[in-house]
Image (cartoon, rainbow, N blue to C red):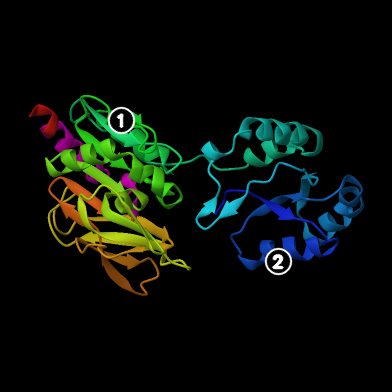
Amino acid sequence: CDVPVVLVVNGKGAALSIAATIKGFKEFRSDSHIVGAILNNVNPMSYLFYKDVIERETGVKLLGYFPVMQGCNFESRHLGLVTAEEIGDLQQIVAKLAAQAAKSVDLDGLLQVAAQAAPLAYDEVSLEPVGRMRVAVAMDKAFCFYYQDALDLLAELGAELVPFSPIADAHLPENISGLVLGGGYPELYAQQLADNKTLLQELKTAIDGGMPCFAECGGFMYLLEHYRDGDKLYSWVGALKGESAMTKKLTRFGYVHLTAQQDNLLCPAGGTINGHEFHYSESTNNGASFIAAKASGRGNWECANTTPTLYAGYPHIHLWGNPEFARSFIKQCAAYAAK
């Protein structure tokens, strides 16, 4: 790989052992191409004291440091970081980090490192719009896990993406011809989602009536009849039979290669695409429309509920991995709009 790499290394309490860490990363792979490092959680005196010896021992240039900065940590939970929407002072934190970077990080040095990268080579993909229609996209604290490039692909194919909140909005957006329900943390807002009964009924009516719906992970959970939290049972959309509940460990984790076992909303039988699963929850109705195979080749399983107008399953799909999946979804939205 000819892309230069800059490591960010946690230096808290490490002293000279930082050199061993950096050298280990550098020499672990012959193609690592590690040329620089930034130290995190170190004070200015420690950085200056160890900079020369670390560079001498590793051959890697230090490009600055960040001190311990109170109030600038991003907290984590069972599926990763707390999302940006939930951090009320996010912009202030980013501004504080930027101001510190200007003081203690060699930004000119970083630009010089970046200039060493070879030009990117790729085949430009040109996609003609399938039609014009409005597609509602669930976007709030419960449903917030999206890849922006996937949403951009849907828009490029002709969708006007209309955000709505399953927590706060009493009704679906007007004049829509499709639904996208992404992943997120619906289990943290189970009661609010269950209390929004008018929207739950509108969603079920729309999906039962053939409105195309693409639902991943948390969105799939939301379409089931119930979410269970111990002895408490919350009624959700009910467009699919079954219920989901949280477990104490990762149920599925990692990249997968999906192969369709039947014709469905996204592709004909035999269609393939890459994706990943990453969830602590489990459901009583995971579906069997696709076979998911681990990228390592170790194990496979059935997943996803589909019909000609529905995809609902745990896997998060990388739509740019096979744009025909996105095209098929938008074609169905266009057909629904035409009706």
What's the distance in space between the residues labelled 2 and 1, CA to CA? 44 Å
Callout 2 crowding tier (Cα within 10 Å): few <14, some 14–19, many ≥20: few
- Examine the rendered structure and indicate whether residue 183 appears above or below residue 129: below
Residue shown at 36% from the left, 51% from the top: 218
Residue shown at 22% from the left, 30% from the top: 128
Q: Where on the picture, by quarter, is residue 262? A: bottom left
Residue 319 on the magenta segment: yes
User: What amino acid is found at the position of numbered circle 2 in the picture?
Assistant: Gly
Is 102 or 67 nearer to us in this picture?
Answer: 67
- Where residue 112 appears, as percent x and y from the top left, is 69, 37
Rendered-image quadrant of the C terminus: top left
Label 2 sits on a secondary structure element that is helix
Specify whether residue 124 is in view.
Answer: no
Q: Where on the picture, by quarter, is residue 301? A: bottom left
Is 8 or 166 nearer to us in this picture?
Answer: 166
- Where residue 248 appears, as percent x and y from the top left, is 48, 68
User: What amino acid is found at the position of numbered circle 1 in the picture?
Assistant: Ala
Bounds of the magenta segment: 316-335
Callout 1 crowding tier (Cα within 10 Å): few <14, some 14–19, many ≥20: some
Q: Looking at the image, is mark 2 or mark 1 earlier in the sequence?
A: 2
Q: Which residue is mark 1?
A: 155
Q: Describe residue 154's horizontal placement relative to residue 51 as left or right.
A: left
Q: Which residue is mark 2?
A: 24
- Assign the magenta stretch its main secondary structure: helix
